[in-house]
Amino acid sequence: MNYFKKLGTANFLMLALCAIIIIVAEYLFLTGDKLHGIFVGLWAPTLLGVMIYLKIINNGGR
């Protein structure tokens, strides 16, 4: 539980959103809508990249 407190609410919600995006992308891809599945699947790494960028910017200001 200490890990979730250290992670923070905003980061936890963003990671949960990434997990949901991955599940939706897999569903779209496996049901035959391959192009939309790939398109939606690219949102998760983009969101993770934005999270990393914001964390670097935040830590660089200290």
Image (spheres, rainbow, N blue to C red):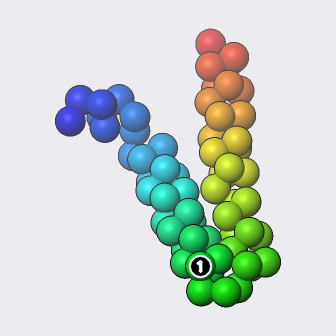
- The residue that label 1 is drawn on is 30
Picture quadrant of residue 22: bottom right
Disc 1 packing (10 Å; few <14; some 14–19; many ≥20): few
Number of marks present in the image shown: 1
Please say if 21 is above or below 16: below
In x, y percent, where is residue 39? 76, 70
Quadrant occupied by the N terminus:
top left
In the picture, the quarter occupied by the C terminus is: top right
Which three-letter amino acid code belongs to the residue tagged 1? Leu
Under tag 1, what secondary structure? helix
In the image shown, does 58 or 45 lie closer to the viewer? 45
Q: Is residue 54 left or right of residue 6?
A: right
Residue 24, given in percent of the width and then of the height, sits at 55, 74
Q: Please name the residue shown 35% across and 29% down the image.
A: 6
* Residue at image location 67% in from the left, 64% down from the top: 41
Task: Indicate the quadrant where residue 3 lies.
Answer: top left
Residue at image coords 73%, 79%: 34
Question: Residue 54: percent from the left, percent from the top?
Answer: 67, 35
In this rendering, does residue 10 appear at all?
Answer: no
22 is higher (above) or lower (below) than 54: below
